[in-house]
Image (cartoon, rainbow, N blue to C red):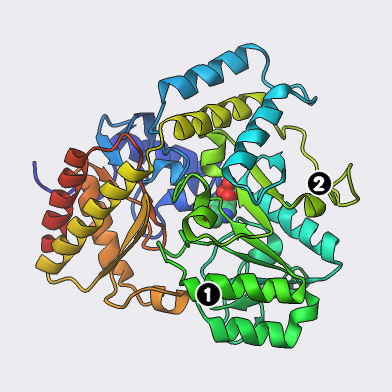
Amino acid sequence: SSAARPSAGPKSVAAFQRASALMPGGVNSPARAFGAVGGTPLFIERAEGPYLYDIDGNRYIDYIGSWGPMILGHAHPEVISAITEAAAKGTSYGAPTEAESRLAEQIIEAVPSIEKVRLVNSGTEATMSALRVARGATGRKKVIKFAGNYHGHVDSLLVAAGSAAATLGAPDSPGVTPGAAEDTLVLSYNDVPGLQNAFDQHGDDIAALILEPVVGNMGCVLPTMEFLNAARDLTSKHGSILIFDEVMTGFRVAYGGAQERFGVTPDMTTLGKIVGGGMPLGAYGGRAEIMNQVLPAGKVFQAGTLSGNPVAVAAGSATLRLLKENPPYEQLERLADRLADGLDRAATSAGMAHTVAKAGAMLTLFFNPEPVDCWDVADRCDREAFGRYFWGLINEGIYMPCSQFEALFFSQQHTEAMIDETIGAAEKVLKSL
Ligand code: PMP
């Protein structure tokens, strides 16, 4: 029937009930719980190519892609065989392997600003470690971050509240002490005078500036070139370390990430998601002189029992090899243009106030007529309409991010026909709002 399903199917509802008694909110990571749109999350049975299948037997065109990693599509046969071959040789040794050097070479070749790299287990670990190294290398305390940028659940970075002025941050989460956040300066994204002002006031105390070089975590928000150049110039001038958090953008907005796309070179880079090919793996790296501060080459402590895990490394290495051999980036760019144009037309014909932003295969339809360039603007989106849009699309077999403030991702397995089907569904849903 065409009656909108108010929520997930009955098996997902039952599964969520069971999970909710066992895990906080029924999930192992909060965004999955559909908190921003209400209702029950879909429980997934399997995924293949561009599709997700839930336990109620519904198929969806997937625009989350595990929140970024699945750029080759789900269950890519060559990635799966790399994983199974590695797993058959044992899943962890806690000792060095040649495969780690191979992945390190692939990363360094893709991202030339990385001269040395360390593999970790998540994006959070990558940013946490990069900050420690930056502070260790400079002997300074303060870190600049931008409101609406997410860098994982690192205590000192769980601070998003702030204004254009350089304010000392107050933590966002219970359990983060004011002390953990007191050296974090929160600024507004794309605000060049604000950045200049922060360096005028605190320049000699600033260890690092960390940013998402295309933001995915307040919806897709693009940097201006003036902003990126100011970040580069001011950090250089003041001896601070510029960290690009490319956990989302790395191997997505270009093979070499946003730094390749925009031609701005950071001192350090953090990676996650695609670099692990859908397995738990992150990485941080940068100039050799900085990375040589890390134990045992230097004195900054950072370690991991499962770091460089052979199964995760196999998945990441196969993924990067496939992306390098057969770059999907032009195709992804064309599909992104098609989707952006289509969603724009659909929203216009539905009389819906909106803007669309995109960079490569990441994209957001904002329920807000203003161009979104920072958190204060993003915050004015119509969240309630977004929630109805989300559930309307689920009903049409389209699995979009369940928050206005998450970019959508697609893969090289998505086709023009699927993009057109998505636009058609969006048109129908937007008209019904
Ligand atoms: N940095 C960015 C830019 C991210 O988008 C994320 C996760 N969405 C992280 C860091 C944290 O990565 P993880 O969830 O793997 O810890």
Residue 129 spot, x, y in % from top left: 74, 52
- The residue located at (39%, 31%) in the rendering is 74
Quadrant (top left, top right, bottom left, bottom right) of the C terminus: bottom left
Amino acid beneath label 2: Gln
- Vertical comparison of 213 with 420: above or below: below
- Vertical comparison of 404 with 42: above or below: below
For mark 2, what is the residue?
302
Label at residue 57: none
Quadrant (top left, top right, bottom left, bottom right) of the N terminus: top left
In this orientation, does residue 182 appear? Answer: no
Q: Residues within 10 Å of mark 2 (few under 14, many from 20)?
A: some
In this orientation, does residue 406 appear? Answer: yes
Which numbered disc, 1 or 2, marks the residue that appears first in the sequence? 1
Amino acid beneath label 1: Phe
Q: Alpha-carbon distance for marks 1 and 2?
A: 31 Å
For mark 1, what is the residue?
227
